[in-house]
Image (cartoon, rainbow, N blue to C red):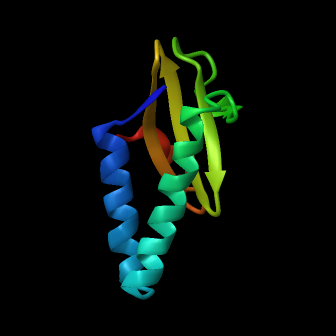
Amino acid sequence: MEIIWTDTAKNDLQNIFRFLKSDISEQKTKDIILQITNKVEILANMPLIGQKEPKFKGLRKEYRRLIESHYKIIYHIFSDNIYINRVFDSRQNPNKLFVK
């Protein structure tokens, strides 16, 4: 299956990078981003590994989540593609997931 990052998910990663870079070294920040993207790559071979995301229950699409450290990776599957919809720091207000 092909993994496709939505623009929103790409922006989420950029925002995470900028935020972390202000507190920790650039190398440590890159390592965290790499951990997130490596976790996503698992989906290519095991797309159903993530749990169903209850915050999105009732929507037309079935959304799933992967967790990497403090980050929740929200995705859905359509046809032969896996769409990464959001990357969210779970230490934030969960209502922010619905703002974009």
Q: Is residue 27 left or right of residue 36?
A: left
Quarter assignment of residue 56: top right
Q: How many marks?
A: 0
Say if 30 sits above or below 85 in the image.
below
Residue 36 location, x and y as percent? 52, 57
Quarter assignment of residue 6: top left
Say if 73 sits above or below 48 in the image.
below
Say if 51 sits above or below 1 in the image.
below
Residue at coordinates 39% horizontally, 41% vertically from top-left? 99
Residue sitting nearer the eye, 43 or 56? 43
Q: Is residue 55 left or right of residue 12?
A: right
Quadrant of the drawing holding the C terminus = top left
Residue 61 location, x and y as percent? 52, 16
Residue at coordinates 49% horizontally, 25% vertically from top-left? 1
Quarter assignment of residue 29: bottom left
Residue 72 visible, this orientation? yes
Say if 47 sits above or below 93 in the image.
above
Residue 90 visible, this orientation? no
Residue 43 location, x and y as percent? 57, 36
Residue at coordinates 37% horizontally, 45% vertically from top-left? 9
Residue at coordinates 47% horizontally, 63% vertically from top-left? 34
Residue 18 location, x and y as percent? 32, 72
